[in-house]
Image: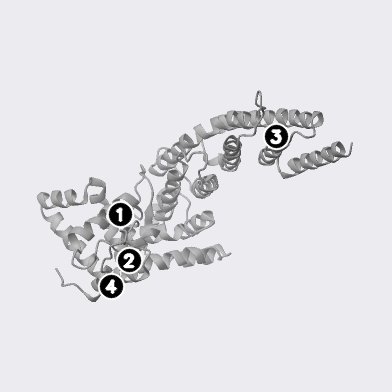
Amino acid sequence: MSPPTAQTAALAPTSSRKPASRPFLGLIDAVLVDGPGAFVFDGSIGREQAAAAWTWMLRDVAGDLIDPGVTETEPAHVEAVLALTPELVARASKHLEIAAATPESARRLRTQLGSEEAMERLPVVVSALKFRDRIDQAQEFGRSANAMADESQLALALQSMPFNDRSVAALLLHAAVGQVSNPSRMITAAIRLAGSAEEAVLQRAGTGVIVEAMFAHAQGQIAVLNPLGVFGDVDLLCRAVDRFHRLMRSVTGYVELNRGSRWSGIAAGLTKSVSARLEPRLRDVAPDLNKALRRRDGVDRLDPDMVLSALNGMYVLAAVRDARDSLALNALFDQVWSHTGQALEIHIDRMFEQIRQDPSDQVSSKRLDAALKMAELRFGLDYADTLRRAKATAERRLNSA
């Protein structure tokens, strides 16, 4: 073990400090992914496995260098850990060498890490630390790629990636793809480099790692699709659906996938997983809409939670509509799309009649406003604005009567 360095002093603990919530203080966040996945990509690391590696390093590898109370909220701590990464890489690599020597050494390291998965991904964690500077450059490459209008220019820029070293290329491309807004252009550039869109040719040329980076990012959207409750971030969910669609279409729309091939299996598995998480949300859309827009017996009132739930469902329905080519939900979507359209028309007609009968009915007026927002998502802005103008005209007439 090397003696404590000058950086150690900068990391002296304080009684009020909370431990870091991000593995390695966020230094390798660009290659971390949330949630488990059936597809394991060489260039990505599960957040849980990274956290296990970080805990192991703090406890068993660099306890004399880094205080366990370091936090990513302190820039000085991040800079200090960054300066120590070469030493961390050297020490962790030594542990990996020892573990590779005998089964007993491997068993001890596995026990220290806490799981087989953490053990398997530890070399990737060490590699991410080793090439952290290049990962930052790869992210910048991804952002720059968005401004490259010429496909040949992008293909030329991609040649800077170390395709002859798959493990490093995987890390860099995972970081780059995370910044790319139009994944299809990256895939067409990869095809241009390989000289063919065939799966086997892309693999042989080394550019197949770009396709797998797309799969990894598509899989990364799945964790966002878990149930969030009434007050969950539906905008985040809809962005995840859109991102999944863009990533999957970049592969399935341009790469010639062979029936029964590995990539075909990955694509089918991801489509099935995402569709399974969206299916219960779709099934709830029409019932939630009816609950939110139905008049209450006795003392009528507007339930804000029900309205919010119905609106969230309509946003999800609209997101699925735009991404349906990448999902296995066509039959259910068509059913829900039809039912919500019919239900909205009935509810809106009924609410207009209630307002005509009782111009002072503020509950019906507010409920109609919510229905028109849902109609905007279902039928389009022009349709909803026409109804809004009709509502305003009717209210003016009734108030002047």
> Looking at the picture, which amino acid does disc 4 mark?
Ala
> Looking at the picture, which amino acid does disc 3 mark?
Val
Task: For mark 2, give the secondary structure.
Answer: loop
Question: Residue at 27% across / 57% down in the picture?
Answer: 54
Residue bearing the label numbered 2:
131
- Evaluate if marks 3 and 2 touch, with contact meaning CB atoms under 8 Å apart: no
Q: Which mark is residue 245?
A: none
* Cα distance in 3D space between marks 4 and 1: 24 Å
Vertically, is 40 above or below 73? above
Give whichever of discs 2 and 1 has the lower sequence position. Answer: 1
Give whichever of discs 4 and 1 has the lower sequence position. Answer: 4
The residue mark sitting in front, 4 or 2, is 4
- Evaluate if marks 4 and 2 touch, with contact meaning CB atoms under 8 Å apart: no
220 on left or right of 288: left
* Cα distance in 3D space between marks 3 and 4: 61 Å
Q: Residues within 10 Å of mark 3 (few under 14, many from 20)?
A: some
> Whole-percent x and y of residue 12?
25, 69
> Looking at the picture, which amino acid does disc 2 mark?
Phe
Q: Which mark is residue 50?
A: 1
Residue bearing the label numbered 3:
363
- Evaluate if marks 3 and 1 touch, with contact meaning CB atoms under 8 Å apart: no
Q: From this viewpoint, is residue 395 visible?
A: yes
Residue bearing the label numbered 4:
10
> Whole-percent x and y of residue 396?
85, 41
Residue 314 falls in image quadrant: top right
> Looking at the picture, which amino acid does disc 1 mark?
Ala
* Cα distance in 3D space between marks 3 and 1: 52 Å
Give whichever of discs 3 and 2 has the lower sequence position. Answer: 2
Image quarter in which the C terminus is found: top right
Which one is nearer the viewer's eye here, 12 or 124?
A: 12
> Whole-percent x and y of residue 288?
58, 31
Give whichever of discs 3 and 4 has the lower sequence position. Answer: 4
